[in-house]
Image (cartoon, rainbow, N blue to C red):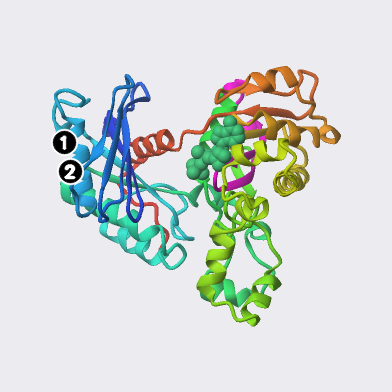
Amino acid sequence: MPDPAPKPPKNVLVVNAGSSSLKFTMFRTDEEKMLAKGIVERIGLCETALKYERFDGKTLEGQVSVADHDGALRVVCEKLVDKKIGVLKKLSEVEAIGHRVVHGGEKFHDSTRVSKEVKQIIQQCAELAPLHNPPNLGGIEACERVFGSVPNVAVFDTAFHHSMPPSSYLYAIPYEYYEKYGIRKYGFHGTSHKFVAQATADFLGKPLSDLKLITCHLGNGASITAVARGKVVDTSMGMTPLSGLVMGTRCGDIDPGVVLYLVRQGLAADDIDKLLNKKSGLLGVAGLNSSDMRDIIQAADGGNDQAQRALWMFVHRLVSYIGAYYTILDGADAVVFTGGIGENSAYIRARVVAKLICLGCILDDAVNHDVLARAAIISTPESRLKAIVMPTNEELMIARETVRVLQASEKPAARK
Ligand code: ADP
């Protein structure tokens, strides 16, 4: 008799640890129900703040005294078992922890259970994501200290994109730079693109393996992915999350010669980094002191030229990618909008879909204006290419991945 499959963990904590923050969501996985979620912010700085929200909408906000991620996690644990606002009787009910890890490099092609070796590789991948992987790893180690033997699973933003062919992921520079430095496209937001692709298939009542989708994650960071039968064929972010679409504060695609020019003008690497990552995109072009799409739209509607320019650049870049991915996929079934802008902005969706008539996608204006953060087809029934709104849920995807990995195998999925 084969061993029975291990029982799936019922209560899964999802952790997203940043350099000075720790986001958490507690799930009951058999019902896919969010029990509680929140964030500890400004860890290690003065006035560390906790925001906690229970499934029934009851909230708690206030300052807490913690010095590090261990302290933040302990505060979260206290709240999870608190008699008044908690959702668990005791901490031992947490059966597994899923972690968002930004960069898995070429080593991780799937989510994986954390081991000593896995942690070492996450550390090595920090070269590619120096601002993200170290705090992500810090979150894992804090959980190991606070939760003891509870299994941890790492879910990588890059993993879903591992199926890209070399023609998509290689840059046209000498091959030895790929071999020596790992310079290639990795792609990000993979957890969101994967969730949204599967959710779209479920929504359409079709297997993902029968669909060709162009998923547009439009938040502060934005990326677009071509997914054929559940596999990524191409994506807009690259070796770092700077390339591709115009974003809130990031420039997206830019002639690399611009960087060289700025170097020759005397700008230091850190200055150029800040310019392209933090001062560009909607913020830089619109010049409104805001990277929030709502502010840009309002100003553009009020006749502000720069805001209008920023909007059209955002739409133009996105439409260019949709056209390219439609071709790469040999046609597609749907363009899917998600993320804060994709889910909430009928205005942006209308402008994008208006440019897709040549691909057989015709907007249903009334439906589009009616849709706010819910799944819906916003194209007309006769459209050859559908336009769909699909809310993302990266935390739920991490919880699902955690269950899947722990059920499937004890072995880490790292390539040696
Ligand atoms: P993040 O990438 O930080 O997770 P989100 O996915 O939450 O961000 O998206 C945040 C963005 O969504 C903000 O820049 C905001 O401009 C945009 N947004 C939210 N609601 C709307 C709306 N109704 N109209 C236009 N943009 C919106």
**Residue 207 highlighted magenta (yes or no):** yes
Amino acid type for the residue under numbered disc 1: Glu
Judging by the rendered image, the residue that carries numbered circle 2 is 74
Residue located at (37% from left, 25% from top): 32
**153 vs 371: above or below:** below
Question: Does residue 399 appear to the left or right of 11 in the view shown?
Answer: right
Question: Does residue 304 appear to the left or right of 12 in the view shown?
Answer: right
Q: Position of residue 43 (x, y in %)?
A: 27, 52
Residue 186 position by quadrant: bottom right
Residue located at (64% from left, 53% from top): 287
The CA distance from mark 2 to mark 1 is: 6 Å
Badge 2 density bin: few <14, some 14–19, many ≥20, Cα 10 Å: some
Residue 329 position by quadrant: top right
Q: Quadrant of ligand 1?
A: top right
Asked whether 168 or 320 is in front, the reply is 320
Marks 2 & 1, CB-CB < 8 Å contact: yes
Asked whether 341 or 385 is in front, the reply is 341
Q: Position of residue 169 (x, y in %)?
A: 62, 59
Residue located at (68% from left, 77% from top): 261
Judging by the rendered image, the residue that carries numbered circle 1 is 78
> CB of residue at label 2: within 8 Å of ligand 1?
no
